[in-house]
Image (cartoon, helix red, strand yellow):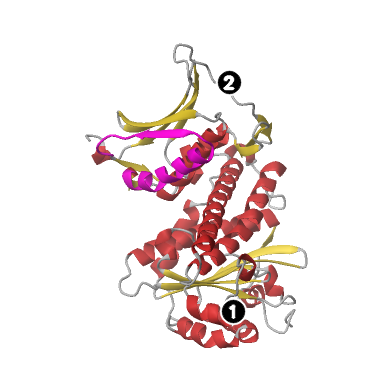
């Protein structure tokens, strides 16, 4: 018997598996997150070799959109299901078309569909992926006070999951169902190549932390498996980061849907763009908080050194520097970036490097008084590239330079610090250093007379780029 008139995805997967592993909510959430990371990379690898139509796959997810890399958002059609839909009309001070007309305009590229309040599916997190190479369903759910994570590559199981979702679309958006069903049918239910499943398994192992040898007993009885030490403040940070990110992602999705309209006044577009920018900044910040907590629980930075690749630093800086400049302008600071004529190829993680650098500079600007000047200097340093942040407070009387007073910081648990003067909460230096280690780099913090706090980041050069 199903819990409701339609089966939930947990019930469908549980029916098709001989047993369901039940674990703590924190461990199930961790399994969900690592599986999503492996799925994201699998999609990147798969779609990189695909040709033809820009719509190379479909993702149905809840309760928030997944897979933020631009390469995926431009290649995937995404539909998000939520029990608490965000009302886009609340943003608009003027009359807008009805919801069906808006749905027609944005089509299926990036849409949000409601679930009925009584539907138990509204309490599940799930992801259905449809591509020409594979289909996959992942589910995180709680039932009878027990949490479990399940996934399947079996085409029949994915098809059953879609039928359960499709029936719900028929209930809430019948006019939308035919188009969505036709889109799903574009991806024939073929069994995945064993190499695809093997690649997923390898990616899953890459994002799985290495065990802490000190926490594993020499001979633990089978009836008493070893468990990692409880870190309540770290687990709280992980939960907080996730809970904040979910509604922000929904708001950003709806904002971007509104920005696709052609009849918006300029002042409304400006406000929506501000909302989009603020949401993106905080989503990236929450991702870093979660990643830092993940590193802390794994007890090793090496466990997160995944997906490091040779990358163009020039491309990352072109995207990042305007955001750094905006952060400085908002705080009435001036920022000067000094770059060599030619930037080398470094080895890191492009997405994480952008986020970590932007977060570091944002926190750096918050610690300086208005009127200060910041210099970002990029220079070679042997087989590494050095990126240095130096504050240079402006002083009307240059004969009497002043030494900036270091900001007061108070520790909040193992990962966070608080600046009472500004009300800013950010990652502490140790956690930030771990993040740089995870992306192949190194952070050094020094106090220098008449300068204050100077931050230096080292990034390894690609082997062939060391002679630049």
The range drawn in magenta is 314-343
Is residue 321 found inside the magenta-colored segment of the image? yes
Residue bearing mark 2:
405
- For label 2, the SS is loop
**Residue shown at the point (49%, 66%) measured from the top left:** 259
Q: Is residue 307 visible?
A: no
Give left or right: position of 47 versus 27.
left
Residue bearing mark 1:
99
| Residue 327 higher or lower than 66, as above or below | above
Residue 433 at x, y = what percent?
51, 34
Which residue extends farthest left? 467
Mark closest to the chain's N terminus, 1 or 2: 1
Which residue extends farthest top? 399
Mark 1 and mark 2: Cα distance apart in space? 54 Å
Which residue extends farthest right? 144
**Residue shown at the point (54%, 56%) measured from the top left:** 34
**Residue shown at the point (60%, 26%) measured from the top left:** 407
Residue 249 at x, y = what percent?
57, 60
Q: Residues within 10 Å of mark 1 (few under 14, many from 20)?
A: few
- For label 1, the SS is helix
Of residues 222 and 354, the one drawn nearer to the viewer in this rendering? 354
């Amino acid at each position: 018997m199903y819990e409701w008139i339609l089966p939930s995805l947990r019930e469908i997967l549980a029916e098709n598996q001989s047993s369901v592993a039940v674990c703590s909510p924190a461990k199930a959430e961790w399994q969900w997150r690592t599986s999503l990371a492996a799925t994201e990379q699998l999609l990147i690898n798969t779609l990189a070799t695909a040709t033809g139509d820009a719509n190379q796959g479909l993702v149905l997810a809840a309760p928030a959109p997944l897979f933020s890399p631009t390469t995926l958002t431009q290649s995937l059609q995404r539909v998000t299901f939520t029990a608490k839909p965000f009302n886009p009309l609340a943003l608009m001070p003027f009359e807008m078309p009805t919801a069906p007309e808006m749905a027609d305009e944005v089509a299926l590229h990036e849409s949000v569909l409601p679930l009925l309040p009584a539907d138990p599916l509204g309490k599940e997190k799930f992801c259905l992926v449809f591509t020409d190479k594979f289909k996959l369903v992942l589910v995180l759910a709680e039932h009878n006070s027990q949490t479990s994570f399940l996934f399947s590559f079996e085409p029949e199981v994915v098809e059953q999951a879609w039928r359960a979702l499709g029936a719900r679309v028929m209930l809430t958006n019948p006019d939308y169902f035919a188009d969505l069903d036709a889109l799903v049918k574009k991806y024939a239910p073929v069994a995945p190549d064993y190499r695809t499943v093997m690649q997923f398994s390898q990616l899953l192992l890459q994002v799985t932390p290495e065990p802490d040898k000190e926490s594993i007993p020499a001979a633990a009885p089978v009836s008493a498996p070893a468990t990692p030490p409880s870190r309540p403040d770290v687990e709280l940070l992980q939960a907080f980061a996730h809970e904040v990110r979910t509604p922000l992602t929904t708001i950003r999705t709806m904002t971007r849907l509104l920005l696709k309209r052609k009849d918006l006044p300029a002042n409304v577009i400006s406000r929506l763009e501000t909302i989009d920018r603020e949401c993106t900044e905080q989503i990236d910040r929450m991702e870093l908080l979660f990643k830092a907590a993940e590193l802390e629980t794994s007890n090793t930075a090496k466990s997160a050194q995944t997906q490091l690749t040779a990358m163009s630093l020039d491309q990352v800086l072109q995207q990042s520097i305007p955001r750094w400049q905006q952060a400085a302008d908002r705080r009435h600071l001036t920022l000067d970036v000094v770059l060599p004529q030619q930037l080398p190829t470094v080895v890191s993680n492009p997405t994480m490097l952008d986020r970590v650098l932007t977060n570091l500079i944002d926190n750096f600007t918050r610690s300086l008084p208005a009127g200060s000047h910041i210099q970002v200097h990029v220079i070679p340093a042997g087989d590494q590239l050095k990126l240095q942040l130096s504050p240079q407070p402006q002083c009307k009387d240059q004969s009497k330079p002043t030494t900036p007073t270091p900001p007061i910081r108070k520790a909040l648990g193992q990962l966070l610090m608080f600046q009472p003067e500004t009300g800013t909460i950010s990652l502490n230096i140790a956690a930030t250093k771990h993040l740089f280690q995870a992306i192949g780099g190194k952070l050094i913090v020094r106090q220098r007379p008449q300068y204050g706090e100077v931050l230096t980041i080292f990034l390894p050069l690609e082997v062939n780029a060391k002679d630049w």
